[in-house]
Image (spheres, rainbow, N blue to C red):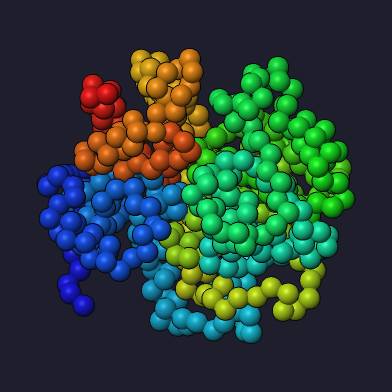
Amino acid sequence: MGKREGDGGLKNLKRPKIVVSPPGPKAKAFIERDQAVTSPSLTRTAPLVGVEEEGVWVKDIDGNIFLDFSSGIAVTNVGHKHPQVVEAIKRQAEKLIFVNSCDFYTLPQVELMEKLCELTPGKFKKRVFLGNSGTEAVECALKIAQWQTRNYYVIAFIGGFHGRTMGSLALTTTSVSARRHFKGMMQGVYHVPYAYCYRCPFKQEYPSCGLACVEFIEEIILKKVVPPDDVACMVVEPIQGAGGYIVPPDDYLPALAKICKRNNIIFVVDEVQTGFCRTGKWWASDHVGIEPDVMVVSKAIAAGLPCGAAIARAELMDWDPNAHENTLGGNPIICEAALAVLDILKKEKLDQNAAKVGGYLLKRFKELAESHESIGDVRGRGMMIGIEFVEDRRTKKPAKDFRNALMEEAFKNGLILLGAGVSSLRLAPPLILTEEQADVGFEIFEESLKRVEKDR
């Protein structure tokens, strides 16, 4: 293998550093190699060939340094290459790399599961299943629900994203492109509108709507479409992620929880993207006081190493040996990394920083929207901010091409952004972001926005 690029020195950086317009020559050459061997099903947001990272900074193969407002889709919550995570990985790798968790036991695995039981909502007894991703955690939740209820009908939400394996894909409805031609998806899923108040499918306004989207579930779905005693579970994101960082009203999730409780439906909350202090609290569920029967988590849990978990009421995981297993889940190195993440989040009070700096950014973007007609809506919680672009504020016609052009312009100027939904950006910086760094990102964003609007 050839020498890899990257030589350190990012910690004290104040601003992005663009030494050659991206993609530079080395990036172009590497991307050609990638295209020859990589599945084209991967969507690439920008021509970033990362070789080094630290804190909120990512360096590419040509020496360009970017400010990361994406965290790898809300993954590097504690910052890139946190030294405590690196040390935990090294320490465990020198002792024990692997014994499979379905046949044997390791200390880090049990310690991590104990911590997750302690930290997640609800004082009831819990059990945990560890996997390698969010989609695996969702699959586990679906199997728990089917095992316990002997039903397979599921209520999911339009615009939701829960993964791409054949069970979780049946729940995912962010676009048809992820579902096209996959006729073997899990059957029995009924999709209902999410509380997307900016684009209410019922053409109503909150709060005068009386939560029409919830009433639709009770009066139409459960009375005319599927009997409630045939429903295994309801699966919902407390804030829709890939759907556009859509924040529902505070009474929405508690209303869904009540429907589930009244009808003995298992309430599954997908905190894969919202968890681990992203929203300014440990869990998005904490903002509205809900206690899921099953919570699924992943992404930020191990700072970028593959890990996912389903945390359930203990009695719901009262199933037979061999009912659900895997080989690589609970890897001791990954569990040690996850334990380090949990310690960092608590010790550095990153929930508080997410609330403080995220609130500061949200305020600035809302103010920016007042003078830019291209911004239709700004919403968010903590460091999870959605900005939706429109061609016309009155019609709310989505401006996807405009959004994409803005992402490209910002990237050229050293700011990493990610799209979501039809025409939204999702801002999800590492939770260690300072107000000074937030200002730098905002400045690049605003200048990029002005340029794209001028060219429009």
Q: In this view, does 279 lie to the left or right of 75?
A: right
Percent x, y of residue 177? 48, 49
Quadrant that contains the C terminus = top left
Quadrant that contains the N terminus = bottom left
The image quadrant of residue 312 is: bottom right
Q: Which residue is drawn at 34% across and 52% down?
A: 44
Q: Is residue 130 left or right of residue 234?
A: left
Residue 192 visible here: yes
417, above or below 200, in the image = below
Q: Residue at x 66, y 54 (%)?
A: 295
Percent x, y of residue 127? 71, 65
25, above or below 96, in the image = above
Percent x, y of residue 288? 67, 36
Q: Nearer the viewer, residue 436 or 446?
A: 446
Q: Which residue is drawn at 65% across and 67% down?
A: 129
Q: Is residue 398 left or right of residue 6?
A: right
Residue 339 visible here: no
Q: Which residue is drawn at 69% across and 39% down?
A: 192
77, above or below 409, in the image = below
Percent x, y of residue 413? 21, 38
The image quadrant of residue 208 is: top right
Q: In this view, does 225 lie to the left or right of 308?
A: right
